[in-house]
Image (cartoon, grey):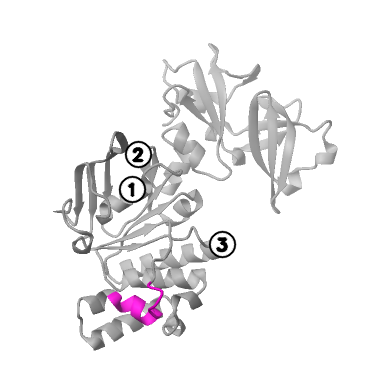
Amino acid sequence: MARLQLRNLEKDYASFRAVHGINLDIEDGEFMVLVGPSGCAKSTTLRMIAGLERITGGEIRIGGELVNDKPPGERGISMVFQNYALYPHMKVRKNLSFSMRLKRRPKDEIENATQDVSKTLEIEALLDRLPKQLSGGQAQRVAVGRALIKKPQVFLFDEPLSNLDAKLRASMRVRITDLHKRLKAEGQQATVVYVTHDQTEAMTMGDRICVMKEGHIMQVADPVTLYNKPANSFVAGFIGSPEMNLIDATLDSDRSINIAGQKLQLGPQLMDRLAANAPKDIILGVRPQHFSLATPDTANALSGKISHVEFMGHEVYLHVQAGKNRLIAVVPSHAYDRKSLRDDQVWLSADAASAHIFNRQSGDNISLD
């Protein structure tokens, strides 16, 4: 059983509180991603789980056991660092087996475990190389293998792919998630806590995602829920690429939405989700993919001027200035023809069923079901 529980976890540095009493349950075999911008305390949280940072308050339980005062080596965890942390003077074979040799395991057991791990990660041909002879992707696989050979209760990953190029990051994402699925299928310990600032990594790898901001948990949910039902404007703006358009607006007495003088009626579905006492000052959230190109006579369309265009192949990112609001719309390449526009003026229609309304003061999503 490798369930991980954080209860009222706090971390202070002198007079500064970095982690504010967070609570999180990570189930046995779950792949949990901690994501957020730099400085949100996700790595600090991971280091407290590992025992590399002393906690100020609260509890950490691994497999039901309180581990607050246990040293890292006795917590049943294994960690993969951003910089790989391989011993430069040891060949891959010895790097992989170092923890087993430290525990004086029998030679044949060490050799069998080294062969099994190297086969799983497809690094058999690298066993007699030094770390300096490895590429970034190869070094990262060795670092994962060194964690895997310990057969820990919980795997901890601290931004392990941030030093790799984009193509290699995509490949390693698949390798790590496939490895997690394989371990689960074989009945081995497979609880993972993975820290990243890259929301693409979070969305493609995690069973669930914990979004953090300034030492607080903003929302914990599966990727689909985070994308479709963000709890607040911070999550809405952080999850998704390009990020959600967050537009300052007012809710008029006729239940229309006023955006710098342009009025939108986003339909009964959205308005019915609002409480009767919804505030006047709101933020309208529309994902770029939920805008479509419209014409001047289209009802409920926002007008603006194109300031920048990014051609992405099968789609186009339109950067549109609508009054004080800078919007991004993602439209199919075949639907966009800039030459047909007069003075780069464009009209955008929003998908009412997919729009969100946030309280401008608290940031809470007041349009959830």
Which residue position is annotated with label 1?
44
Sequence-wise first label, 2 or 1: 1
Q: Which residues are magenta?
A: 87-98
Q: Is residue 121 left or right of residue 200?
A: left
Mark 1: secondary structure:
helix
Which residue position is annotated with label 3?
165
- 143 vs 367: above or below: below
Q: Residue visible at 24% across and 53% down?
A: 4
Q: Check disc 1: other Cα within 10 Å, few if <14, some if 14-19, many if 20+.
A: many
Q: Residue visible at 35% across and 83% down?
A: 115
Mark 2: secondary structure:
loop
Q: Residue visible at 72% across and 28% down?
A: 304
- Per the image, is 119 magenta? no
Q: Could you tell me how far apart the alpha carbons at marks 3 and 1 are, in whole angstroms? A: 25 Å
Sequence-wise first label, 2 or 3: 3
Q: Check disc 2: other Cα within 10 Å, few if <14, some if 14-19, many if 20+.
A: many
Q: Is residue 77 left or right of residue 145?
A: left
Q: Are marks 2 and 3 in contact (CB under 8 Å)?
A: no
Tag shown at residue 215: 2
Q: Could you tell me how far apart the alpha carbons at marks 2 and 3 are, in whole angstroms? A: 29 Å
Q: Pick the residue in front: 345 or 269.
A: 345
